[in-house]
């Protein structure tokens, strides 16, 4: 199938009537993917293999994506495929972008979190008062390495 045929199939599934992102209205309205999506909420395009719709949009508009690069959204709309709302970046760029915009799943928002922010503060105070790692780990139901990491602020860095 030619690039032109792929493009026709792709753009048929896009609505140009999306909302304007509140945090960056200068971008204009999002172009929204209107058909199937992955469980993550990102658009899904089938072209012999499953592809992320925003990546296909980038490739149709700008050409191939170099290895190790991600296609990121300026608008933070997972279903947006408008080429000028997209930009290339590394995994680290993506993580930094998420954190800067407050979308990172950290602390108790993280799906694997076993502790709350309050518990982290209590653990740090108890550890500073001399409570042993093993005892804190047993009481809070986590590994000693987790207690050590949060007390040394290698994890839960955002908690004062």
Image (spheres, grey):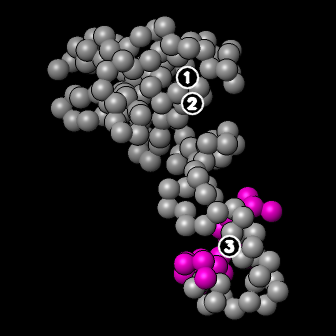
Image check: 45 left or right of 145? left
In the image, 99 versus 107, the foreground residue is 107
Dot placed on the residue nearer the N-terminal end, 1 or 3: 1
Element on which disc 1 rests: helix
User: How far separated are the C-alphas under marks 1 and 2?
Assistant: 9 Å
Element on which disc 3 rests: helix
Q: How many marks?
A: 3
Image check: 120 left or right of 134? right
**Picture quadrant of residue 130:** bottom right
In the rendered structure, find residue 76 and report the number of the disc placed on it. 2
In the rendered structure, find residue 159 and report the number of the disc placed on it. none
Disc 1 target residue: 85
* Discs 1/2, front: 2
Dot placed on the residue nearer the N-terminal end, 2 or 3: 2
Image check: 3 left or right of 31? left
**Residue at image x 60%, y 14%?**
20
Image check: 152 left or right of 48? right
User: How far separated are the C-alphas under marks 2 and 3?
Assistant: 30 Å
Magenta residues, as a range? Answer: 139-160
**Residue at image x 24%, y 29%?**
46
**Does the magenta segment cover residue 147?**
yes
Element on which disc 2 rests: loop
Q: Residues within 10 Å of mark 3 (few under 14, many from 20)?
A: some
Residue 87 percent coordinates (x, y): 54, 30
Disc 3 target residue: 150
**Residue at image x 45%, y 22%?**
81
User: For the C terminus, which image quadrant?
Assistant: bottom right
In the image, 51 versus 43, the foreground residue is 43
Can residue 4 be seen at all in this image of the molecule? no
């Amino acid at each position: 199938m030619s690039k032109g045929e792929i493009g026709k199939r792709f753009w048929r599934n896009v609505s140009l009537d999306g909302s304007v992102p509140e945090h960056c209205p200068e971008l204009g309205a999002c172009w929204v993917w209107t058909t199937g999506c992955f469980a993550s909420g990102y658009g899904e395009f089938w072209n012999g293999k499953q592809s992320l719709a925003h990546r296909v949009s980038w490739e149709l508009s700008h050409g191939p994506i170099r290895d190790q690069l991600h296609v990121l959204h300026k608008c933070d709309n997972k279903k947006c495929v408008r080429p000028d709302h997209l930009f290339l970046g590394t995994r680290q760029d993506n993580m930094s972008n998420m954190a800067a915009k407050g979308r990172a799943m950290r602390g108790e928002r993280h799906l694997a979190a076993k502790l709350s922010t309050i518990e982290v503060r209590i653990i740090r105070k108890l550890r500073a008062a001399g409570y042993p790692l093993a005892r804190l780990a047993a009481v809070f139901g986590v590994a000693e390495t987790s207690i050590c990491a949060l007390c040394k602020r290698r994890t839960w860095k955002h908690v004062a």
